[in-house]
Image (tube, rainbow, N blue to C red):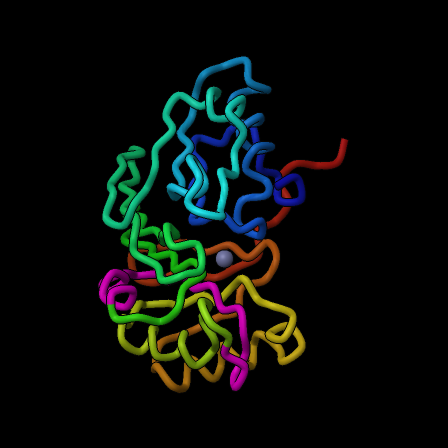
């Protein structure tokens, strides 16, 4: 956040899809920032049941101390809705090892952004992410290397072909994806689906313009002190 000049104290809301540490580990630190070190009861924390209360072997991910700090704490189940003006958030279903995992649909003034978190590719996930401008998918494994409970490049290709967003971004790469080159995976998906697909990179910025979505690199806005 510092590298791109975003002040963590300006955080309004934190959305957490599920209770695996690669998805929740910074949450308590961000809650501290959002509530100005716990001195102001403000902001929204929304997360899966596992993150907020615990679900079976998973969670909770947030201490009672940190749960007491935001103004609103909300458990998101598939199709739960939340208004964060001007955004409207809807949770989507996932089929993951943390069974309470969700994804998110974020309706912005620039159109619908769909975030697909860790999940196996199942029909209800595909259905939930139709009709969006931008689809962001967590792709953990490259071509020919599928593992349970996560999307591989083939899965993402099928998902993107069926949901037909204006632009797809793949992210959350496992080591095998890094070794096989994320750009190569994105190109394969683009050829299969006919949808422009880019591999996320650090500091990538996406701008939902009226006519198209532009991809650029965020320039540092705050000079070093
Ligand atoms: Zn996970």
Question: Which residue is at a point 51% across and 29% down the rendered structure image?
Answer: 10
Q: Residue furthest front?
A: 56
Q: Nearer the viewer, residue 153 or 67?
A: 67
Q: Residue furthest top?
A: 39
Question: Which residue is at a point 47% across and 63% down the rendered structure image?
Answer: 138
In the rendered image, the quadrant that contains the N terminus is top right
Does the magenta portion include 65?
no
Q: Nearer the viewer, residue 114 or 75?
A: 75
The x and y percentages for residue 16 are 45, 44
Q: Nearer the viewer, residue 184 or 117?
A: 117
Q: Is residue 111 above or below residue 31?
A: below
Q: Is residue 104 left or right of residue 2?
A: left
* Number of dots carrying numbers: 0
In the rendered image, the quadrant that contains the C terminus is top right
The x and y percentages for residue 128 are 25, 61
Q: Which residues lie in the magenta part? A: 124-146
Q: Is residue 110 above or below residue 169?
A: above
Q: Is residue 77 left or right of residue 223?
A: left
Image quadrant of residue 96? bottom left
Q: Is residue 219 above or below residue 71?
A: below
The x and y percentages for residue 209 are 35, 55
Question: Which residue is at a point 24% across and 65% down the rendered structure image?
Answer: 124
The x and y percentages for residue 194 are 34, 82
Question: Which residue is at a point 51% across and 63% down the rendered structure image?
Answer: 171
């Amino acid at each position: 956040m510092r590298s791109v000049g975003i002040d963590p104290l300006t955080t309004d809301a934190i959305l957490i899809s599920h209770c695996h540490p690669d998805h929740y580990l910074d949450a308590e630190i961000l809650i501290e920032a959002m509530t100005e070190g716990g001195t102001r009861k403000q902001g929204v924390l929304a997360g899966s049941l596992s993150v907020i209360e615990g679900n079976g072997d998973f969670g909770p991910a947030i201490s009672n101390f940190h749960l007491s700090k935001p103004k609103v704490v909300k458990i998101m189940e598939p199709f739960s809705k939340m208004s964060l003006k001007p955004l409207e958030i809807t949770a989507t279903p996932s089929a993951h090892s943390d069974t309470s995992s969700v994804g998110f649909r974020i309706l912005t003034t620039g159109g619908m952004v769909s975030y697909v978190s860790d999940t196996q590719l199942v029909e209800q996930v595909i259905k939930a992410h139709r009709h969006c401008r931008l689809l962001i998918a967590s792709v953990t494994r490259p071509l020919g290397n599928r593992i349970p409970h996560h999307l591989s490049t083939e899965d993402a290709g099928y998902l993107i072909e069926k949901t037909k967003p204006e632009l797809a971004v793949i992210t959350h790469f496992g080591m095998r994806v890094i070794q096989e080159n994320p750009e190569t995976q994105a190109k394969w998906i683009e050829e299969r689906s006919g949808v422009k697909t880019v591999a996320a990179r650090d500091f990538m910025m996406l701008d939902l313009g009226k006519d198209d979505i532009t991809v650029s690199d965020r320039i540092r806005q705050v000079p070093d002190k």
